[in-house]
Image (cartoon, rainbow, N blue to C red):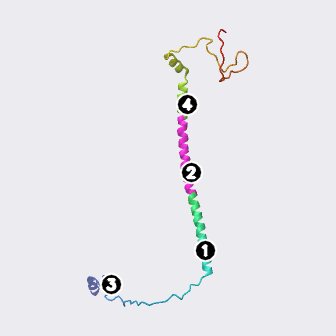
C-alpha cells in the first residue's frame, strides 16, 4: 500500500520533482595575468608537418579538381556530340528533300509543258549548236573570249 501511495503522489522513482538545491554555486574571480614576457618557441618538426600537410591537401585538391574538370568536359562533349548528330540528321533530311525537289523541277515533261504555256516552240533542225562537241574544222572545243569579233557583211 505504501508503494501505491508513492505513485499517486508522483514521487515514485524521481518522477516530476526537481530538487531545491542543485549543489554549490560557482564563483569566478578575475585574475590579471601578464603574458607579455612569454615567447613562443618555434617547433621545426611541427612546421615541417604543417608544410607536408598543406602540400598533401594541395595535391588532393588538384586531383579532385582535375577529375571534376574532366567529368564536366566529358558531359559537355556528350551534349555537343548529340547536338551535332541531331544537326546531321536534320541536314540529311533537308538534303533528301532538296534532291527530290530538284528531280521534280528537272523533269523534262514539266519543262516542256511550261515552255508551251510561255509560247515557245521546239527548235528547227540546224537551229541548235552544241558547244560541247568539236568544231567542224576539228580544232577542238570553242572557248569564249572577251575580244570583239569583227563581222564583215556580205559573206
Looking at the image, is mark 3 or mark 4 earlier in the sequence? 3
Q: How far apart are labels 4 and 2 at the CA level?
A: 32 Å
- Majority secondary structure of magenta residues: helix
Q: Nearer the viewer, mark 2 or mark 1?
A: 1
| Residue 82 colored in magenta in the image | yes
Which of 136/98 is in front?
136
Q: Secondary structure at mark 3?
A: helix
Looking at the image, is mark 2 or mark 1 earlier in the sequence? 1
Q: How far apart are labels 4 and 1 at the CA level?
A: 70 Å
Q: Position of residue 20 (x, y in %)?
A: 31, 88
Which of 32/86 is in front?
32
Q: How far apart are labels 3 and 2 at the CA level?
A: 69 Å
Question: Pointer 4: what residue?
Answer: 99
Question: Pointer 2: what residue?
Answer: 77
Provide the residue span drawn in magenta: 70-94
Question: Pointer 1: what residue?
Answer: 51
Residue appearing at x 55%, y 43% in the figure: 85
Q: Nearer the viewer, mark 4 or mark 1?
A: 1
Q: How many residues crowd around disc 3 within 10 Å: few (fewer than 14), some, or many (20 or more)?
A: few
Looking at the image, is mark 3 or mark 1 earlier in the sequence? 3
Above or below, 35 against 139 in this view is: below
Looking at the image, is mark 4 or mark 1 earlier in the sequence? 1
Amino acid at each position: 500500500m505504501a508503494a501505491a501511495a508513492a505513485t499517486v503522489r508522483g514521487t515514485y522513482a524521481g518522477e516530476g520533482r526537481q530538487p531545491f538545491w542543485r549543489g554549490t554555486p560557482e564563483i569566478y574571480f578575475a585574475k590579471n595575468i601578464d603574458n607579455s614576457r612569454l615567447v613562443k618557441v618555434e617547433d621545426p618538426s611541427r612546421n615541417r608537418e604543417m608544410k607536408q600537410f598543406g602540400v598533401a591537401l594541395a595535391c588532393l585538391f588538384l586531383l579532385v579538381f582535375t577529375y571534376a574538370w574532366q567529368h564536366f568536359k566529358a558531359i559537355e562533349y556528350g551534349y555537343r556530340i548529340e547536338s551535332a548528330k541531331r544537326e546531321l540528321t536534320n541536314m540529311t533530311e533537308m538534303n533528301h528533300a532538296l534532291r527530290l525537289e530538284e528531280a521534280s523541277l528537272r523533269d523534262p515533261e514539266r519543262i516542256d509543258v511550261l515552255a508551251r504555256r510561255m509560247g515557245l516552240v521546239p527548235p528547227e533542225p540546224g537551229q541548235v549548236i552544241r558547244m560541247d562537241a568539236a568544231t567542224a574544222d576539228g580544232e577542238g572545243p570553242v572557248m569564249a573570249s572577251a575580244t570583239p569579233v569583227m563581222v564583215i557583211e556580205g559573206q
